[in-house]
Amino acid sequence: MKKYLFISLIILSGCSQNIANFTLVSTESTNLDNEYESIGQIEGVDIAYIIVVIPTGTPRIDEAVKNALLTNNADYITNTVIKIESFYFPYIGGYSRYKVKGEGWRMIDNVMPPAAQPLRKIKGYKPETGEPIYE
C-alpha cells in the first residue's frame, strides 16, 4: 500500500524550474530616455495544455512577456524572473507554461522626453554664476 502511495505522489507531482533572471525585459522597442513610473509587481503566462498524450501547442517566453505587458498596460518589466511549470497526469492530461514575474513600468504621459522639449536659445551667461540666460 505504501509503495502505491509513493508512486502515485511521484506521478501526480508537477515541477517548476527557474529558467532565467533578467534586469530588463520587453517585447516592444522602448525609449528609455522617457520618464516612467512603477506600477508594482506584474505577472504573465503562456500555457499549452496536454490532452491525453497530445500537446495543444508549445508555450513561448515572448508570449508570456507580451501577456504581462498587455494585461497591465506596461512598457517594460525589470527584475524579471522567468519560470517553467509543468504538470502531467498520465493518459489524462496536464499543462506546461512559462510564468513571467517582475516590476512593471509605464511611461508618464504628461512629461516630454528631453529630445522632444522645445529648444531655447541662449543669449548669454550670468557672470556671477555661469548659468545660461535664455531669450
Image: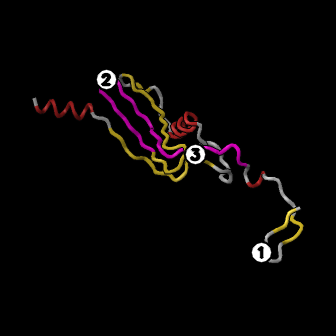
Residue sitting nearer the eye, 93 or 80: 80
- Measure how far apart labels 1 and 3 are at the Cα level: 38 Å
In the rendered image, the vertical position of residue 30 relative to residue 73, given as above or below: below
For this orientation, the residue located farthest to the left is: 1
Identify residue for label 3. 105
Residue 59 position in % (x across, y down): 47, 34
Q: Residue at the spot x=42%, y=43% of the render?
A: 83
Q: Is mark 1 on a helix, strand or loop?
A: loop
In the rendered image, the vertical position of residue 79 relative to residue 13, given as above or below: below
Quadrant of the rendering where the C terminus is positioned: bottom right
Q: Residue at the spot x=49%, y=48% of the render?
A: 80
Amino acid under disc 3: Trp
In the rendered image, the vertical position of residue 41 relative to residue 3, given as above or below: below
Residue 73 position in % (x across, y down): 59, 37
Q: Is mark 3 on a helix, strand or loop?
A: strand
Amino acid under disc 2: Tyr
**Residue range (magenta):** 82-111
For label 3, count other residues whose C-alpha is less than 10 Å away and answer few (under 14), some (14-19) or many (20+). many
| Res 105 quadrant in image | top right
> Of the numbered discs in the image, which one, if any, rests on residue 129?
1
Residue sitting nearer the eye, 116 or 62: 116
Q: Is mark 2 on a helix, strand or loop?
A: loop
Residue sitting nearer the eye, 123 or 80: 123
Identify residue for label 2. 91
